[in-house]
Image (cartoon, grey):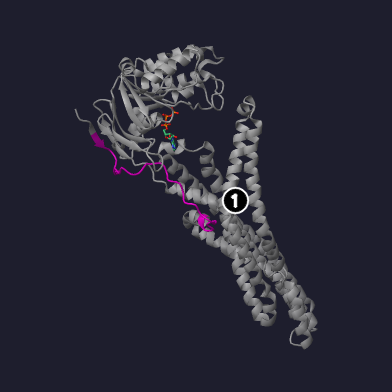
């Protein structure tokens, strides 16, 4: 019998690459434009507001110059003996007006840029979250939960500074600097040269400093990440470290990460501080050149005292806007790596989804010459088997032999590199993702339980389930007994990770969830840790419930639990090397026989 496929969407079937992402290329220096590229697309919808913000910020900076202009005019009049009260009053009012308008313009500019920033970051976060939801599930299994938080929350947050402050302040700083330069030259080109003389020199120094520190940016950021990870691991692993009395070694590793980071910082400081320090000193020393040149010209009678005072007022702070601009560049360099990671995430190909619905004639799972690898080298080589509906298929083998990887290919945590994984006679890539997720239940080794009631955690398998159905699932999963003993029964709240439950109890809750989901295919990654016989027996019975009419694939660690399996697949180094029932395999004296011998010996100790 053939499976029927109905296409209920216009999505196209692309057996696109859903392989794990390749490592990103090493990059020597910061990509200063990475943040602007990332956020740029989100600003186009707010072009007008952003433009108005830039104009107002420029106006605000221009207004800062009005008091300087007023003082210059008043001084000029006073020195020329033409100063009158109305003239002075008018200029005082102009100066005041400049300050008030400047503040008002800056206020509105900042309000606008913040509105634009919040909107852009909101939309960026939404896109990141939406894209994450379309990524293969394996993507999340290879990352720490903190990574996703960093990508959705922290990195976009940093872009707020760039949009809300960097863009308006940067553009206004540059335009003000250009306008002041033109003004200085218009007033007196000789004094203007004296005022700007030191600026190019200081900026050559800064460029040298930034190029040098830029080359070390990736090493610096890597060392910072290593140090953070090492400290977090050191603290999180403290109980294990103490129990095994390994404080010394563990601290030594963390100390090394901290020392490496300090070494990189010291080396950075050795080059950056002399150059950067000279820049900051030089850039604000225009006055040192303005004053002697001005006095000289004053003596020759070719410069008025008012013009000299004007240059002293304006020229002294001539480079301030450029300093602002370069501070923005520093911010860009600082957040460039985070923006690059977010951009890479958004470019990670989404999982292909045909959206097709299939009428399955059966729920057999068939692997046809499947090869797969997480990076360049394959960890599965030409794996072929069929797991029949209503039967238990157990995967066994040494650690790292590829059992969990085989299991993860059924619900498309990853897509195969070669061959096919078939469900009910259809390539899993041809089944709409929604239907595939409804058809396959996956019971993980480390069950994630939400900070909610036990009932809500079980109901996660089927939100429509009644209380009776929840209880029936718990009974079938042999979880009802321990739940009933809890103070609030099914209404007992679980801690952030269900800390109040034992590992075996957690897995039975997960089985209850899977039973409630009533999926025809169940993949169970059997938990390793539960040595207590009561728990084992209960899990054994719960697994029995799972098999009824379903295709069950168990990644087995405790061999006696699968001794009655309909089919045992023995894996080694990514290959299927033996298959059969327990008794038949024991007759072959192969790997399974050796594993069984070791296992029974270990249990009898
Ligand atoms: N997300 C991943 N990224 C890169 N390599 C991985 C990943 N997951 C597993 N591997 C590698 O693939 C190989 C097979 O791992 P897998 O977890 O499938 O083995 P396993 O037989 O289930 O092991 P165990 O019994 O210890 O759970 C191992 O070499 C492992 O290091």
Toward the viewer: 554 or 424? 554
The percent position of residue 528, horizontal first and vertical second, equals 47, 22
- Residue that carries the numbered disc 1 in the rendered image: 220
**Prevailing secondary structure class for the magenta stretch in the rendered image:** loop
Left/right of residue 284 with respect to residue 13 in the rendered view: right
Task: Classify 310 as above or below 238.
Answer: below
The percent position of residue 140, horizontal first and vertical second, equals 46, 37
Toward the viewer: 237 or 286? 237
Task: Classify 208 as above or below 468.
Answer: below
The percent position of residue 144, horizontal first and vertical second, equals 51, 37
Left/right of residue 320 with respect to residue 599 in the rendered view: right
Residue at x-position 44% and y-position 17%:
599
Give the farthest residue toward the left. 1
User: Would residue 477 be visible to someone looking at this image?
Assistant: no
Residue at x-position 63% and y-position 70%:
177
Quadrant occupied by the N terminus? top left
Toward the viewer: 123 or 444? 444
Residue at x-position 48% and y-position 23%:
456
- Secondary structure at numbered mark 1: helix
Label 1 crowd (10 A; few <14 / some 14-19 / many >=20) = many
Residue 367 found in image quarter: top left
User: Would residue 483 be visible to someone looking at this image?
Assistant: yes
* Magenta-drawn stretch contains 31: yes
The percent position of residue 174, horizontal first and vertical second, equals 60, 67
* Magenta-drawn stretch contains 343: no
> Quadrant location of ligand 1?
top left
Give the farthest residue toward the front. 589
Which residues are the magenta region? 5-34
Task: Classify 184 as above or below 374.
Answer: below
Query: Is the residue marked 1 within 8 Å of ligand 1, measured from its CB?
Result: no
């Amino acid at each position: 019998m053939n499976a029927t496929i109905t296409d209920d969407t216009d999505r196209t079937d692309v057996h696109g690459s859903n392989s794990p992402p390749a490592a990103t290329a090493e990059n020597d220096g910061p990509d200063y434009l990475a943040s602007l590229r990332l956020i740029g697309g989100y600003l186009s919808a707010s072009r007008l507001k952003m433009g108005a913000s830039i104009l107002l910020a420029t106006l605000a900076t221009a207004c800062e110059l009005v008091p300087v202009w007023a003082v210059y005019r008043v001084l000029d009049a006073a020195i020329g003996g033409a100063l009158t009260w109305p003239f002075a009053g008018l200029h005082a009012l102009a100066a005041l007006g400049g300050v008030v308008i400047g503040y008002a313009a800056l206020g509105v500019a900042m309000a606008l840029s913040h509105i634009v920033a919040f909107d852009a970051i909101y939309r960026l976060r939404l896109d990141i979250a939406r894209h994450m939801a379309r990524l293969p599930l394996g993507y999340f299994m290879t990352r720490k939960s903190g990574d996703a938080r960093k990508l959705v929350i922290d990195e976009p947050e940093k872009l707020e500074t760039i949009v809300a402050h960097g863009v308006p302040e940067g553009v206004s700083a540059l335009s003000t600097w250009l306008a002041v330069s033109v003004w200085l030259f218009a007033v007196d080109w000789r004094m203007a040269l004296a005022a700007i003389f030191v600026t190019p020199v200081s900026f050559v120094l800064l460029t040298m400093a930034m190029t040098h520190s830029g080359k070390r940016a990736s090493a610096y950021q890597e060392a910072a990440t290593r140090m953070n990870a090492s400290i977090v691991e050191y603290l999180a692993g403290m109980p294990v470290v103490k129990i095994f009395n390994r404080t010394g070694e563990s601290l030594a590793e963390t100390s090394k990460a901290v020392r490496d980071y300090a070494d990189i910082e010291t080396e950075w400081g050795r080059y950056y501080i002399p150059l950067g320090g000279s820049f900051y000193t030089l850039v604000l020393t225009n006055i040192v050149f303005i004053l002697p040149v001005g006095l000289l010209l004053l003596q020759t009678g070719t410069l008025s005292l008012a013009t000299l005072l004007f240059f002293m007022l304006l020229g002294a702070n001539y480079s301030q806007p450029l300093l602002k601009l370069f501070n923005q560049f520093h911010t860009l360099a600082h957040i460039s790596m985070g923006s690059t990671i977010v951009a890479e995430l958004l470019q990670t190909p989404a999982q292909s989804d045909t959206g097709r619905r299939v009428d399955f004639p059966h729920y057999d799972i068939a692997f046809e010459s499947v090869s797969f690898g997480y990076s360049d080298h394959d960890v599965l080589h030409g794996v072929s088997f069929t797991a029949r509906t209503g039967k238990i298929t157990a995967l066994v083998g040494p650690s790292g032999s590829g059992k969990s990887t085989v299991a993860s290919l059924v619900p498309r945590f990853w897509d195969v590199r070669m061959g096919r994984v078939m469900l009910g006679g259809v390539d899993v890539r041809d089944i709409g993702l929604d239907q595939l997720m409804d058809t396959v239940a996956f019971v993980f080794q480390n069950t994630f339980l939400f900070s909610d009631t036990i009932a809500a955690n079980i109901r996660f398998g089927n939100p429509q389930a009644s209380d009776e159905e929840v209880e029936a699932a718990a009974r079938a999963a042999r979880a009802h007994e321990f739940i009933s003993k809890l103070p609030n029964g099914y209404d007992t709240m679980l801690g952030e990770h269900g800390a109040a439950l034992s590992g075996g109890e957690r897995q039975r809750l997960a089985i209850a969830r899977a039973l409630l989901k009533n999926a025809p295919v169940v993949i169970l990654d059997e938990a390793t840790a539960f040595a207590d016989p009561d728990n084992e027996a209960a899990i054994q019975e719960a697994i029995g419930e799972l098999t009824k009419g379903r295709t069950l694939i168990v990644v087995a660690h405790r061999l006696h639990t699968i001794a009655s399996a309909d089919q045992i697949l023995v894996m080694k180094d990514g290959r299927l090397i033996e298959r059969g029932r327990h008794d038949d395999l024991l007759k072959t004296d192969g790997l399974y026989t050796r594993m069984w011998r070791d296992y029974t010996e270990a249990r009898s100790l």
